[in-house]
Image: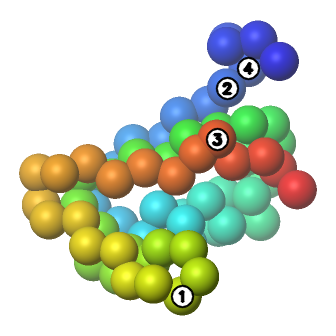
Amino acid sequence: MSISSVKSFYYESLDSTMNEAKRLIQSGQITNTAFVFANHQTSGRGTRGKTWSSPEGTPARDGPIPPH
């Protein structure tokens, strides 16, 4: 995988970077490894069912996200 094949998606605000990553995969916009960044999350979630807080101005990201 070359760095030029990695996509990045940037948002001011999202419900969750994980949710957006799933939507991007389902819509076919992510077909290879990608990163999703948000300046603010309103419903972020962590691993193993834990909540994830991302205060405004503290960027959050998910990635690298494989397409499958």
Q: CA distance from mark 1 to mark 2?
A: 28 Å
- Looking at the rendered structure, the secondary structure element under dot 2 is loop
Q: Which residue is mark 1?
A: 49
* Mark 2 neighbour density, 10 Å: few (under 14) some (14–19) many (20 or more): some
- Looking at the rendered structure, the secondary structure element under dot 3 is strand
**Residues under numbered marks 2 and 3 in contact, where contact means CB atoms less than 8 Å apart:** yes
> What residue lies at 58% left-to-right and 45% top-to-bottom?
63
Question: In the depicted view, which residue is nearer to us: 1 or 24?
Answer: 1
Look at label 1 and name its amino acid. Answer: Gly
Q: CA distance from mark 1 to mark 4?
A: 31 Å
Which is more N-terminal, label 3 or label 4?
4
Q: Which residue is mark 2?
A: 6
- Residue 33 lies in quadrant: top right
> What residue lies at 12% left-to-right and 60% top-to-bottom?
56
Instruction: Tell me where residue 26 appears, x and y as whole percent.
Output: 77, 65
Look at label 3 and name its amino acid. Answer: Pro
Viewer-nearest of discs 3 and 1? 1
Viewer-nearest of discs 1 and 2? 1
Q: CA distance from mark 4 to mark 3?
A: 12 Å
Viewer-nearest of discs 1 and 4? 1
- Looking at the rendered structure, the secondary structure element under dot 4 is helix
Which is more N-terminal, label 1 or label 3?
1
* Mark 4 neighbour density, 10 Å: few (under 14) some (14–19) many (20 or more): few
Using residue 19 as the reference point, say whether residue 51 is left or right of it. left
Which is more N-terminal, label 4 or label 1?
4
**Residues under numbered marks 4 and 2 in contact, where contact means CB atoms less than 8 Å apart:** yes
Q: Which residue is mark 3?
A: 64
Look at label 4 and name its amino acid. Answer: Ser
Q: Which residue is mark 4?
A: 5
Which is more N-terminal, label 3 or label 2?
2
Viewer-nearest of discs 4 and 3? 3
